Amino acid sequence: MSVIDAVSATAAGLVVAINGSETELSWRWVRDHGEDQESFDPTTKQRRVYAINPESPQPAMRAELSVIDGTPIVCIIWPESPEQTWISQSTITDLLDPRPPSARTCWHRPQETAVTKGNVSDVLTNDAALSAWVGDIADFGFGVLGGFQGGHNEVTALARRIGYPQSTIFGTTWDLASDIDAHDDTAYTQTFLAPHTDGTYAHEAPGLQMFCCTERSGTGGESVIVDGFAIAETLRTEHAEDFEVLTSVSVPGHYIEPGVELRTSRPAIRLDDHGNIVQISMNNYDRSPMHLPSGDMDAFYRAYGQLHEFANDRSRWMSIRLEPGDVLINDNWRVLHGREAYTGGRRFVGCYLNHSDLESRMRTLGV
Amino acid sequence: MSVIDAVSATAAGLVVAINGSETELSWRWVRDHGEDQESFDPTTKQRRVYAINPESPQPAMRAELSVIDGTPIVCIIWPESPEQTWISQSTITDLLDPRPPSARTCWHRPQETAVTKGNVSDVLTNDAALSAWVGDIADFGFGVLGGFQGGHNEVTALARRIGYPQSTIFGTTWDLASDIDAHDDTAYTQTFLAPHTDGTYAHEAPGLQMFCCTERSGTGGESVIVDGFAIAETLRTEHAEDFEVLTSVSVPGHYIEPGVELRTSRPAIRLDDHGNIVQISMNNYDRSPMHLPSGDMDAFYRAYGQLHEFANDRSRWMSIRLEPGDVLINDNWRVLHGREAYTGGRRFVGCYLNHSDLESRMRTLGV
């Protein structure tokens, strides 16, 4: 963890030295980032000051490193004494010298995963079991539990350990089986389903999908998971042109049934401002008509075809036959899921959760 | 509406002439966009063919304009006769010569709005009343109803005419009043609330927020709405540099309370690939610490300050005093909302809905 070596006040701003390198933070920035009681409400964690006035604030008189209630701070003393502003040193070091993002365990082969099968009743009652489950989702993009009993209420109780079942055209919690004709979708058949992500037609693509198995007979029907982040990183290093196309071309998706016409578009690989991969979106079934200038269209087909080839490479597949009582939860922003064709009965109850709530739970659990 | 003047088959692809301008669509593109029963499932609206193979398909033998069941189509005849692919002409014209997006009614002064107050029981039972309500949201970013009675169940029933109440840390449907201490947030006080959007800390920012008034006494407390799209268009034309900053700099937001740590970032003005404004995000209360290289930080403060100034210009505010039975619904991706300080009692039940579901309802109602 970085530490601040020294601070000083100049006419233009606060000068902060970290690891021998100096950065000047304007006095407006300092007013905007105060964490003392005058500047910031410690209960709501919301700003109290409004520092975006047209006039720049007066320069401070003095700045010094200090400690308040055990927290290392930078204390700024203004000319209108005794007014002071303080900012915790860690806020400044987090912004000026941020820690690298924690490395994700991308997996290219199923044997590179180390997901441990937990138990539903443990997760419901025990924070260590919850942390192990959420930790697997954070590390590998999916988690597995056994010991599920019940139906929709029990799905809700389990989901509430992470976040909230989200209401969509499929319901808040749903049943999934081939004998359901509530929706005209390939998911509600017995055919093979190639790996894909859900909700390519919605701005709010599900963050997680949870499948709780309640019935299983016959052959086939293994659940299949592929690490989309691993594929995207391979594309980045080995097929740089395709990666560029897949991060920049918006791919439209749709879901249409009576009374419903959902549409959106986003790149198959979505990056944040720092180039980190944050979301994979791919569903060739629900892809909408699109047209690009002719060279770009060829490049798109080549790139999307390469992505599709990796996603359909069986050596990359984690294959799990879920039996009654088994629960599979997938990070739908990271892994693609599918299933083998099957015979007989295969029934799940499940739900969708938001990615924001997953990330919040990961932060509060420290996984 | 555009029409196709002529089609022909070349070795490289299908040549389409629209308004005297020719475009060549590769045979791979044609295979990918087939709408005949072999290529496309008319029930699920999902693709049946997979056209992204490494090998390009053979050129077609012939292409012709035709009509099937009253639908003008392009019919493509392949060498492997009698195989045919057809694509509706409107699919092709929509992609090659799209209609301009319908003009939104941006409003800069409240008198430029023409929102009509509907009635809850009409909206619940009558599609014309629903269309008028959703039409106001589409045109002006908000809608108003009277005649609300009841509580959480009635909020759900009304919301279900558009989409689904979404579950968040605030609940699926919620109560809002100053005597509620469930959340440490400025919203749960009697103070002035400057115009803002909700959920700047969530990837899935609410698309709509619905406030159903159940109690009102005392003074003040008017609800305030500002058209963020109008402000953004003014910035685009009159403050181009600020517009550029606000569309490109990601602004982080957070919501923190025990067991919750929600964080995300996005530009204050989010554009689609065509430069259309799709989402405004601004909440100075929930903005997180951020740092940019010093010139960029100054430019951000100037641009954000200009946005803030427009949002806080009272001449832009639509001000509504909601009385018991009144319902206000806001497009949280377009308008900013706030409220005047107040005395006495002021109580709402309400909920959040997704923007995808609003857009779906707008499409199926044709508003």
Image (cartoon, coloured by chain):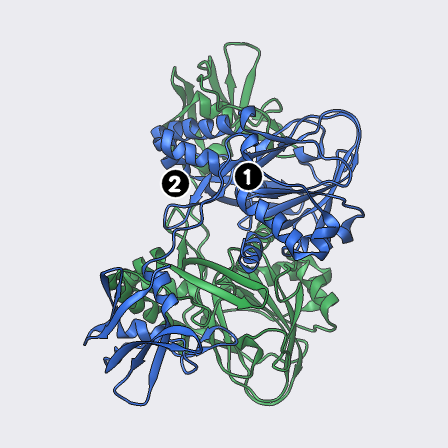
Chain colours: A blue, B green
Who is closer to the viewer here, B66 or A254? A254
Residue B41, percent from left and from top: 63, 29
Which amino acid, mark 2? Ser
Q: Quadrant of the C terminus of chain B?
A: bottom right
Q: Which residue is mark 1?
A: A335
Residue A328, percent from left and from top: 67, 41
Please give the name of the residue rendered at 75% of the width and 35% of the height, measured from the top-left corner. Answer: A323
Label 1, residues with CA under 10 Å away: few <14, some 14-19, many ≥20: many
In the picture as drawn, the residue positioned furthest to the top comes out as B80
Please give the name of the residue rendered at 39% of the width and 27% of the height, measured from the top-left corner. Answer: A298
SS for dot 2:
helix
Who is closer to the viewer here, B73 or A29? A29
Q: Which residue is mark 2?
A: A248
Residue B88, percent from left and from top: 53, 30
Label 2, residues with CA under 10 Å away: few <14, some 14-19, many ≥20: some
Taking the image as shown, residue A178 lies to the left or right of residue A167, namely right
* CA gap, disc 1 and disc 2: 20 Å
Which mark is on residue A318? Answer: none
Which amino acid, mark 1? Val
In the picture as drawn, the residue positioned furthest to the left comes out as A11
Of the numbered discs 1 and 2, the one sitting upstream in the chain is 2
Taking the image as shown, residue B313 lies to the left or right of residue B237, namely right
Q: Chain of mark 1?
A: A
Above or below: residue B226 compared with residue A180: below
Please give the name of the residue rendered at 23% of the width and 74% of the height, measured from the top-left corner. Answer: A8
Q: Is residue B367 visible?
A: no
Taking the image as shown, residue A367 lies to the left or right of residue A133, namely left
Displayed quadrant of residue A215: top right
Displayed quadrant of residue B29: top left
Taking the image as shown, residue A347 lies to the left or right of residue B115, namely right
Who is closer to the viewer here, B229 or B262? B262
